[in-house]
């Protein structure tokens, strides 16, 4: 029977990984070159992995500014193929041990499922503790991560490959702390890392209503004093067990009668709407798009595609009136943007 490592380095899995890693990026020169020499490069990668000669390349670092400045580390395409190959094999098995109400980067979960679940818990409780971790990805301790992985992975060859991927983060974060945000494996590792928090909250604190979306988490209870105690215990647990710090400015107690912001939306007992910060970002984006359209730097089709992504996301809240208002404003300078905004139906939580 093939081991996980054998499945990861198999040619069929590497071909699937190369296809998955190239989706939406086929015009990128590195991706195009890899696809042009696909058979030879996949075979070379297979041989390097199987023999233990594989070494991770260096990252290209750049910044994005939405919603705030973030440093993104982009691995060479060859390494991104390896990330997919590893993730697609071990994720399907290890994900089964994850807590049901962990929603980030998991099949069948996601933002909208998390919001729907949060609103159901909000309706059943009087108070909510909304928690956040300070600089989560840059703060992940790679030795602790390694220990958590080793507890689930015993095969030496797979451990060595995981070590190579984990240690590649030293190109971005010197020392022993930090995961590159841009890696598919980093998303999975980060979920695994905070699975320890899930276990603590559910089985030690015995919180009935709890949700986590990466490092953004909610605990619900009818007694605010209980939530205050849980906040202190979570702060101590994160620091002593995971070398993480609770973000004190973003961790707050809310009355569920008033509602609160979560994952870019504002959820309350009366419904779900786009949070004010998300609306400000959208208006800024539309202003930028108007400038680009005036300069001829983008086509109507490109505008429609970009706005449709936001529209599909926002359609899960009560945004019909908002989208009609934005479409009216955009009609002065675009035909595609209003059409994209108005083509979606609202799916109420």
Image (cartoon, rainbow, N blue to C red):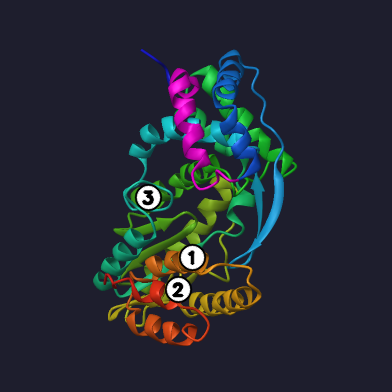
The boundaries of the magenta stretch are: 5-27
Q: Secondary structure at mark 3?
A: helix
Q: In the rendered image of this protein, does residue 57 appear above or below residue 138?
A: above
- Quadrant (top left, top right, bottom left, bottom right) of the C terminus: bottom left
Q: CA distance from mark 3 to mark 2?
A: 53 Å
Q: Position of residue 171 (x, y in %)?
A: 73, 40
Q: Residue at x 54, y 18 (%)?
A: 157
**Does residue 1 show up?**
yes
Q: Position of residue 124 (x, y in %)?
A: 24, 70
The reply to whether the C-beta atoms of the residues labelled 1 and 2 are less than 8 Å apart is: yes
Q: Nearer the viewer, residue 207 or 102?
A: 102
Q: Badge 1 is on which residue?
A: 301
Q: Residue at x 54, y 35 (%)?
A: 83
Question: Which residue is the site of mark 2?
Answer: 336
Query: Which residue extends farthest right?
Result: 174
Q: Position of residue 138 (x, y in %)?
A: 64, 51
Mark 3 Cα-neighbour bin, 10 Å: few <14, some 14–19, many ≥20 = few
Q: Mark 3 = which residue? A: 204
Label tally? 3
């Amino acid at each position: 029977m093939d081991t996980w490592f054998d499945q990861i380095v198999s040619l069929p899995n590497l071909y699937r990984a190369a296809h998955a890693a190239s989706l939406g990026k086929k015009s990128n020169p590195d991706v195009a070159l890899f696809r042009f020499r696909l058979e030879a490069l996949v075979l070379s990668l297979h041989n390097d992995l199987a023999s233990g000669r594989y070494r991770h390349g260096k990252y290209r670092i750049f910044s994005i500014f939405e919603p705030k400045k973030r440093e993104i580390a982009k691995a060479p395409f060859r390494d991104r193929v390896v990330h997919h190959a590893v993730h697609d094999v071990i994720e399907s098995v290890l994900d089964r041990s994850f807590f049901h109400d962990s929603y980030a980067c998991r099949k069948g979960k996601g933002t909208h499922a998390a919001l729907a679940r949060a609103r159901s818990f909000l309706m059943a409780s009087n108070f909510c503790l909304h928690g956040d971790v300070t600089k989560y990805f840059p703060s992940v301790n790679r030795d602790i991560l390694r220990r958590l992985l080793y507890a689930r992975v015993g095969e030496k060859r797979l451990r060595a490959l995981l070590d190579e991927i984990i240690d590649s983060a030293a190109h971005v974060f010197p020392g022993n702390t930090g995961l590159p945000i841009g890696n598919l494996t980093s998303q999975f590792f980060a979920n695994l890392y905070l699975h320890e928090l899930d276990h603590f909250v559910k089985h030690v604190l015995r919180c009935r209503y709890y949700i986590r979306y990466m490092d953004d988490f909610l605990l619900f209870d009818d007694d605010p004093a209980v939530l205050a105690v849980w906040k202190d215990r979570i702060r101590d647990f994160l620091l002593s067990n995971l070398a993480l710090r609770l973000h004190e400015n973003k961790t707050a107690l809310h009355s569920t009668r008033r509602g609160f912001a979560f994952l870019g939306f504002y959820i309350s007992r009366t419904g779900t709407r786009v949070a004010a910060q998300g609306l400000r970002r959208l208006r800024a984006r539309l202003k930028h798009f108007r400038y680009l359209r005036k300069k001829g730097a983008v086509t109507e089709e490109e505008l429609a595609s970009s706005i449709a992504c936001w529209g599909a996301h926002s359609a899960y809240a009560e945004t019909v009136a908002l989208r009609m208002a934005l479409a009216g404003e955009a009609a002065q300078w675009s035909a595609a943007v209003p059409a994209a905004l108005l083509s979606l139906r609202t799916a109420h939580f």
